[in-house]
Image (spheres, rainbow, N blue to C red):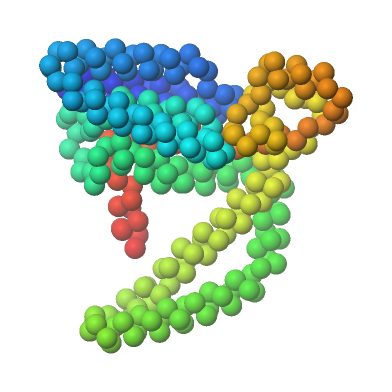
Amino acid sequence: MVFDLVLLAIALVGSSAAAIYDLKTTEVPDWLFYVMGGLGLIFSIIQALSTNNFLTLENATIFSLGLFGFGFLMYKTGQWGGADAVLLGLIGFMVPQLPSGFLTNLIFPFPISFLFNVFLIGAAYMIVYAIIFAYRTKTLFGIFSKEVKASARMLGMFSTILFFALVGITLYMNSIFFLNLNTLQIFRLSIVPIIFLIGLLLFYKFAQIIEKFGFRKKIPISKLRVGDMLMSKKELVGITPEQLHRIKKSKKKFVWIKEGVRFAPAFPLALLYTVFFGDAILLLSLIL
């Protein structure tokens, strides 16, 4: 039990430190991962030796490699930064199961529930991040407002048609399967999917505007710095001092850089949620 809590603490403190570095500098130092990995490996081996049980260590290694492989795929496709992939693998190694003393009910093995929570909790985090980013950028809300006003009529017509279609389908299912739904239940089953769909469409449009007008910048070479991400690179990786030196020696006057959501805070948030509350996917069932 003690070792489980120690490993959980290392994962939580380490991922929280990575989140702070990511928010402040967009870069997570390599030494932090070395410390996390080294401490995790030492305590995991001590735990296996003291309990004469190497199964947990084996499972931790398997889960860690699987999660890191998934994270690396996300990195290579430009969805995550390299630090995100490493964090996912390290947490999977240090917390391969629900720590002793926690009575949280999980649908899946802990690393799988944690992975799902990274996306679900991460989605909520990204919405908050995008709103704060847009607020600080000032002009993005104005652009979004114009886009929504321009498509409001079409969106309203689409929602109305979809609502009556869903009402018809619900009434048909109610009569065929004798569900005995009342008017309020029929209305709820028809309107809730539309609210979710409109919300997703609006957020998608909002994300497109942030991507186009907020996360892409054309800057003079003189203002380029270590850690900036070039638009020409598919992966979310910052330039090194050597690359910066070569670029500044070139004859280019301007360069396009990109900025993404600083996603590292999603990992400690998802870890805490998984340990104390379980599967975030259950929240959807409560809403629906």
Q: What residue is shown at x 75% (from left), y 25% (from top)?
A: 224
Q: What residue is shown at x 57% (from left), y 55% (from top)?
A: 204
**Residue 131 visible in the snapshot:** yes
Residue farthest along the left direction in this orientation: 52
Residue 261 location (% of width, % of height): 56, 38
Vertical placement of residue 128 versus 268, above or below: below
User: Which quadrant is home to the C terminus?
Assistant: bottom left
Residue 223 location (% of width, % of height): 78, 25
Which residue occupies the foreground of this view, 276 or 65? 65
Vertical placement of residue 224 versus 200, above or below: above
**Residue 183 visible in the snapshot:** no
Q: What residue is shown at x 46% (from left), y 46% (from top)?
A: 124
Judged left or right of residue 235, residue 3 is left
Q: What residue is shown at x 64% (from left), y 70% (from top)?
A: 152
Judged left or right of residue 11, residue 263 is right
Judged left or right of residue 101, residue 270 is right
Which residue occupies the foreground of this view, 237 or 15? 237
Residue 99 location (% of width, % of height): 22, 29
Q: How many marks?
A: 0
Residue 16 location (% of width, % of height): 43, 26
